[in-house]
Amino acid sequence: MKRDQVLKEQVKPIDLMNTDSIVGLVEAYKDSSIQSRAIATCASALENALKDPSRPTVILGLSGAMIAGGMRKIISDLIKTGVVDVIVTIGAIPYQDFYQAMGYRHYKCSPMIDDVALRELFLDRIYDTIVDEEKFREVDEHIGNLAEKLEARPYSSREFLSYLGSQIDDEDSILRNAHKYGVPIFAPALNDSSIGIGLTHLYDRMRGSGKAYMSLDPIRDNYELAQVKIKSDKTAVIYIGGGVPKNYIQQTEVIAEMLGHDKGGHHYAIQITTDSPVWGGLSGCTFEEAQSWGKINKEASKAVAYVEATIGLSLMAGYILQKGVWKGRERLDMQWDGDELKAIGRLPLE
C-alpha cells in the first residue's frame, strides 16, 4: 500500500444548488461518503446488472411496511418497466396492496398517538400510519370468498397471488401489474398476514361442510422458485430489508444444488437494511458470510447500504427509473405449466 494510491480519490461536496433530480443527487453521492455513497454504490450495482448482456433474472426481496410507507407505486413501476422479474415478499405487502386496490387508504398520524384510544375506534397503527380495522375485516372476508371460488387443490403462493391480481382493477396495484406482466410473486410466509387470516376464515367455514377447497403448498413455492434459479443463466438479487424474503431467495441456490444444478450462487447482490451483522441474524448478515454457504457467487458484484428502506428504495429506484436504464431491455416471459417452469423466454417491453 502506497500513500499516493490511498489518497487517489477525493470526497467532493454535494452541490444541491445545481442538483435538480434524483439521478443528479445519486451521481453526486458517488463522490460523497458514509451511507450516501453506499446508496450510490447500490444504484450502480443494479445499473450494472440491468446492463449485463447476459440478461440476469432480477429477484426483489421485500419486507417491512412498504405500502404504509408509500412505496406501492414505486414497486409497481419497477414491474411495469421490467426492472424486476420476480418478487419474494411477506404477506403484508400484497395484502395491503389489495386493501388499497379496493379503495381503502392509509392515513398519517403521530407515533405518539394514544393506542388504547385507537383500539376503541377499531383503528390500527403502523408506526406513524393508520389503517381501518373495519375495512381490514372486509378485505379479509373478501379474500376468503375469492379463494372459495378456486378449484379445490393445493396452490403455490405464486399461483394464488396471481389469481388475486387478476381480480383487481387498479393501474397502480403491485398484484395487478405482476399478473399482467407475468412477474411471479412468492410469499412463503403468506399465513403470517391478513391474507392468512382471510384463508383461516375460509377454513373455519369449510371444515364442517364436507366440501373440498383450496389450500396453500409452501414446499411447492420452494420448488417453483428453485426452477427460476435453475433456468436463469445469472441472477441478481435485491433485498429491501431482510427476514424471510432474504433467506428464501438465498436458499434457492442450495435447493438448486440439491436438485442437481450447481448455479454458482447469485451474481449480483444488493441490500438496503438497518440490521447489523454483529447480532448473527440473517437480516443483517453480510454477502461475504453468504459466500461461505455458496449462496452468493465468489466473484459477485455486491453492495450494501445501511439506510431505512423507504428512503433507500426511493433513491435507488428513482435513479434507475429516471435515468432510463430499463429502456431497450427485454422482459422475461416465464412459461408455467402447473408447478413446472417450462422455459424463460423474452419479450419486448411495451
Image (cartoon, rainbow, N blue to C red):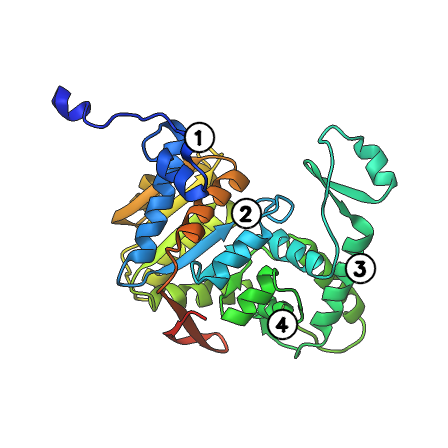
User: On the image, numbered disc 3 is attached to which residue?
Assistant: 138
Helix, strand or loop for disc 1: helix
Q: Nearer the viewer, mark 1 or mark 3?
A: 1
Question: Label 2 near label 4: C-beta < 8 Å?
Answer: no
Q: Residue furthest front?
A: 18
- Image x and y of residue 290, in percent: 34, 44
Q: Residue at x 30, y 57 (%)?
A: 51
Is residue 29 found left or right of 186 in the rendered image? left
- Image x and y of residue 33, in percent: 36, 27
Helix, strand or loop for disc 2: loop
Q: Amino acid at mark 2?
A: Ser
Residue 120 sits in quarter? top right
- Residues packed near mark 3 inside 10 Å, few (<14), some (14 to 19) or many (20 plus): few
Looking at the image, is 284 positioned above or below residue 76?
above
Q: Earlier in the sequence, mark 1 or mark 4?
A: 1
Q: Earlier in the sequence, mark 2 or mark 1?
A: 1
Q: Residue at x 77, y 30 (%)?
A: 113
Looking at the image, is 190 positioned above or below residue 116?
below
User: On the image, numbered disc 1 is attached to which residue?
Assistant: 17
Disc 1 and disc 3: Cα gap in Å?
A: 49 Å
